[in-house]
Image (cartoon, grey):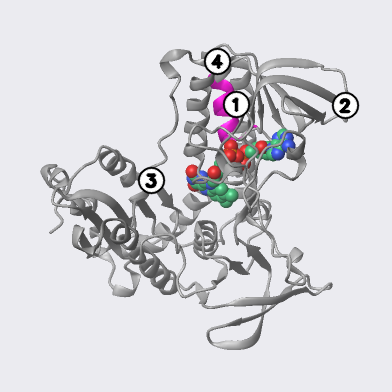
Amino acid sequence: MAPISKECDYLVIGGGSGGLASARRASGQWRAKTIAVESSRLGGTCVNVGCVPKKVTWNAAAIAETLHEAKAYGFSIKETAPFDWTTFKHKRDAYVSRLNGIYEKNLEKDKVEWLHGRAHFLSKNEVEVVLHDGSKQTIRAKNILIATGGHPNIPKDIPGSELGITSDGFFELEKRPEKVALVGAGYIAVEMAGMFRHLGSETHLFIRHDTFLRSFDPMIQETITAEYERQGIIIHRQSSQQKLQKDPTTGKLTLHYSDSTTKSSTLELDCLLWAIGRAPEVEDLALPNAGVKQSEKGHIIADEYQNTNIPHIYSLGDVSGNIELTPVAIAAGRLLANRLFGGPAHKNSKLDYSNIPSVVFAHPEVGSIGLSEPDARKKYGDDNIKVYNTSFTAMYYAMMDSDADKAPTKYKLVVEGEEERVVGLHILGAGCSEMLQGFGVAVKMGARKRDFDACVAIHPTSAEELVTLK
Ligand SMILES: Cc1cc2nc3c(=O)[nH]c(=O)nc-3n(C[C@H](O)[C@H](O)[C@H](O)COP(=O)(O)OP(=O)(O)OC[C@H]3O[C@@H](n4cnc5c(N)ncnc54)[C@H](O)[C@@H]3O)c2cc1C
């Protein structure tokens, strides 16, 4: 057994959203002796290959949309050169690097010791860290948090699949691909397809069924799928991929596929992006050494208090697979640190995983909190559910001459029982991501339809339609 080189109250494995939030709360606020281990760049998925660079790119795509629409408002904007992807990419990288530095400073400020290395369990309370310079440290900890996140999947059974990239590779692209295909129907595929399209790539989206965003309310699924087609994204429904090949001289890819219109066809591409789901980052942790239990898909099983089956080992965020969003990991991490180190006042501290709002940065944006209409009907019964809908063209589009240039806006409120308590809110249209946060507070507080109605509208906005639903 290697000699113990460090001891601490709290060892956090993974310096991403959840791990850093938990480590900083434990040390900064509660003075627990805390060590955080991160094998790559501080900030994890969100900062480096997720929310942050994604939203910056989405902003660029939204500007491209606005430039296109500006003509209808009387502007004569001539684009003298195509979007400069390369310069934009380097500026985005520099922003992310600045954030990495800020995260490091924040750790210092909160007196969290940071080790740059990869951790694995030796036993229930001992972890070995292989540091970046190749040396090793063995740490004995009273409490250990596993917050190692996840990674994108690449299909194993499709020859040549490794020639494609994933969402991680999206952020490495130095040039805009002229012709790109994305495979997947979740929010990452949908967001990236929208960004490629609006930044000028010919974009193909391969989905297994007839709509995408399939965990969302059917109104969202159907509207956004139709809207993407209106915008020129080529959707391949009921599709499957047989193989991917690369021409060694031109570097072009050829995808062999089938879809609802063809049993067998090929598509020449500059880039293919797999967005077919993510897997927990557990392979290197040597979990059997600690006896930590995993689900069939490999996620670490944690209860609502983030406890694993082993006392003093906890898990949260994407590696435990319960609502994979940054603010969820952050909130769970802080609340866990409060519970472990914050004394009796915090002994029951835990995250309430119900009614968590989420947004898809599609074109247009999508927001959702609570139950979809089918889920609400299943849970409460058809007789107890009422649905309020509205569908309209936002005033922004009044200046567009052709209906073909107008994006849809649709809202749905799902209410339950005589009191008409809001159990689901689903919105699609410009500005929805910012709108949802405020309405989320109301839903979380248990608002009823009449509470929405009692709030005087703000005019002229799109959001006012949510407080005047009939
Ligand atoms: C393309 C994309 C877009 C996204 N957009 C959004 C969004 O808009 N909004 C949102 O809320 N969420 C978004 N997410 C999800 C969000 O990024 C994750 O839910 C969040 O980062 C999870 O935090 P975490 O702490 O669980 O893991 P992570 O942030 O992934 O951090 C885990 C860290 O652990 C490190 N690690 C792994 N194994 C070890 C080891 N053995 N030793 C040491 N370190 C290790 C990893 O290097 C990593 O830095 C997006 C994700 C992707 C991929």
Tell me the distance, in whole angstroms, between the alpha carbons under discs 4 and 1: 16 Å
Residue appearing at x 59%, y 28% in the figure? 20
Q: In front: mark 1 or mark 2?
A: 2
Q: Amino acid at mark 1?
A: Ile
SS of the residue under disc 1: helix
Residue appearing at x 53%, y 84% in the figure? 260
SS of the residue under disc 4: helix
What number is the disc on residue 135? 2
Residue 32 picture quarter: top right
Q: Which residue is mark 4?
A: 28
Q: Amino acid at mark 2?
A: Ser
| Residue 405 image offset from top left, x and y in percent | 34, 70
SS of the residue under disc 2: loop
> Do we see residue 56 in this rendering?
no
Above-or-below relation of 307 to 242: above
Question: In the visual, does 135 lie left or right of 408?
Answer: right
Quadrant the C terminus occupies: bottom left
Q: In front: mark 4 or mark 1?
A: 4
Q: Amino acid at mark 3?
A: Pro
Tell me the crowding category of disc 3: few under 14, some 14 to 19, or many 20 or more residues within 10 angstroms, Cα based: many
Quadrant the N terminus occupies: top right
What number is the disc on residue 357? 3
Closer to the chain start, of discs 1 and 3, is 1
> Do we see residue 446 in this rendering?
yes
Closer to the chain start, of discs 4 and 1, is 4
